[in-house]
């Protein structure tokens, strides 16, 4: 039996099941886009904008959990010098900066 005769012998309502499946899959994709993908892209853009706006004196946290104050920003090589204590500076890649804590009061 070839494929064309199989399609001709199907009941009349069987073809509508395929369309409803495709519509449901499309709706699932749209919902996932608006609830998962789009917010993540928005958050990523905000993080990139934050990293580009870093300036000397900002208090930040790195991805490794190191707290410090920005001592120098080098846009050319994409790193910053982070002062973690008096006269203790470490070189950190800009992409490892995750949070600004300038507005949080220190104890």
Image (cartoon, helix red, strand yellow):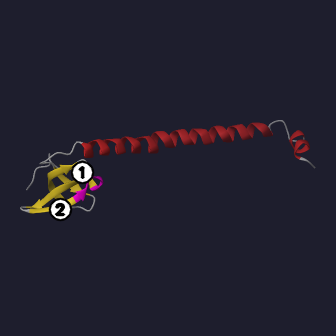
Image position, residue 56 (x, y; %): 13, 47
Q: Quadrant of residue 37?
A: top left
Relative vertical location of residue 88 with respect to residue 34 in this rendering, above or below: below
Do tag 2 and tag 1 residues touch (Cβ < 8 Å)? no
Q: Which residue position is annotated with label 1?
A: 99
- Magenta span contains residue 94: yes
Image position, residue 49 (x, y; %): 29, 41
Q: Secondary structure at mark 1?
A: strand
Q: Which mark is residue 54?
A: none
Disc with the residue nearer the chain's start (2 vs 1) = 2
Outermost residue, front side? 76
Q: Nearer the viewer, residue 40 or 89?
A: 89
Q: Which residue position is annotated with label 2?
A: 90
Image position, residue 11 (x, y; %): 85, 39
Q: Secondary structure at mark 2?
A: strand
Q: Residue at x 84, y 36 (%)?
A: 12
The residues bearing labels 2 and 1 have C-alpha atoms spaced at a distance of 17 Å
Q: Residue at x 20, y 60 (%)?
A: 91
Q: Nearer the viewer, residue 15 or 93?
A: 93
- The range drawn in magenta is 92-96
Q: Which mark is in front, 2 or 1? A: 2
């Amino acid at each position: 039996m070839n494929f064309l005769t199989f399609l001709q012998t199907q009941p009349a309502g069987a073809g509508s099941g395929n369309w409803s499946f495709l519509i449901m899959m499309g709706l699932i994709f749209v919902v996932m886009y608006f609830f998962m993908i789009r917010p993540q892209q928005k958050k990523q853009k905000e993080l990139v904008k934050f990293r580009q706006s870093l300036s000397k004196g900002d208090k930040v946290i790195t991805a490794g959990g190191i707290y410090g104050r920005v001592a120098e920003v080098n846009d050319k090589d994409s790193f910053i010098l982070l002062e973690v204590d008096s006269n203790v500076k470490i070189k950190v890649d800009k992409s490892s900066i995750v949070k600004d804590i300038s507005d949080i009061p220190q104890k």
